[in-house]
Image (cartoon, helix red, strand yellow):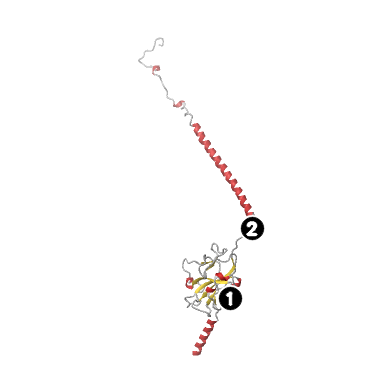
Amino acid sequence: MKPLVQFVLLCALCGAGNGVPERVTYVPEIVRRVVGKITQTTVALQQPLCVFETTEQLCTACDVWLVVANSTGVSKFENDKNGFLDPSMFTYEDAFSGSNGFYFTLRTKRSNYACPPATGQILSVRVGSEVPCTTSNCNAPLPAGGTFRMKYVLVNPDLAFPTANIIGETEFSEDIKLLSAKDPNSIDNFSVRRTGGMVVITAILSILLFLLLAMFAAMLALVCCKKSVLSDFPEPLATSGSLRKYHTHSLQTKSNIIPPKGKM
């Protein structure tokens, strides 16, 4: 029984000493339904929710880091990941000015990526959104127009050199090409001509609208003046049917009055 225990312990030590991180079959992707998912200096990346759920479950202090690399940094990271990599030594400032080609950023406790995600939890991270850069591993804006690949790694902060401290990793993402600012000299003048035509059309429509309003105002004034002229004349006389008969008292014949002579 004792030799069997020794053999198991030996295998465990060999496995821990080879420094090969556990590979998780997960590829970081860009969040599709986000406005500005790719800009000149930032990328909206999916969070690694539930990704490292079964990796080294006893490591409660493990941190999840994001590795951002260019074409040179991808191969260099793959060569160096089996040894001890101190994230504080791989910063944004030195990533692309030297031979490293990659850096660590967005340090997060694994417990923040628990599975399943909490209700209302944000499911994306904005890579390159930290301005100003105040820490060694800050999430600084990416170089405009560059092409990068990204992966998440699980790091045990309790391990020290020369023991390998990266105990889990995802796949690298596909190439992510950032947007580039357009050269003003390359702008097509056709858009300028089209804008001038739109100005002319707008001016014509404005003139037509003014004429229509003027005609409406003139018609309104004419109607008002016509009513005013008709009101200056007296009202028409009543028809004959509405006149009352009028009899003078001197012309009325009375029974007690003697008619004059010669009228008998």
Q: From the viewer's side, name the closer residue of 90 and 108.
A: 90
Q: Residue furthest left?
A: 256
Q: Position of residue 212 (x, y in %)?
A: 56, 42
Q: How many discs mark residues in the rendered view?
A: 2
Whether residue 1 is visible: no
| Residue under label 1 | 78
Q: Position of residue 137 (x, y in %)?
A: 52, 70
| Residue under label 2 | 185
Question: Which-is-in-front pick, marks 2 and 1?
Answer: 2
Task: Name the kind of residue labelled 1 in the image.
Answer: Glu
Q: Label 1's element?
A: helix
For the point 49% across and 33% down, the residue is: 228
Left or right of residue 13: residue 196 = right
Task: Name the kind of residue labelled 2 in the image.
Answer: Asn
Taking 87 as reference, is 252 above or below it? Answer: above
Q: Position of residue 47 (x, y in %)?
A: 52, 69
Taking 81 as reference, is 199 above or below it? Answer: above
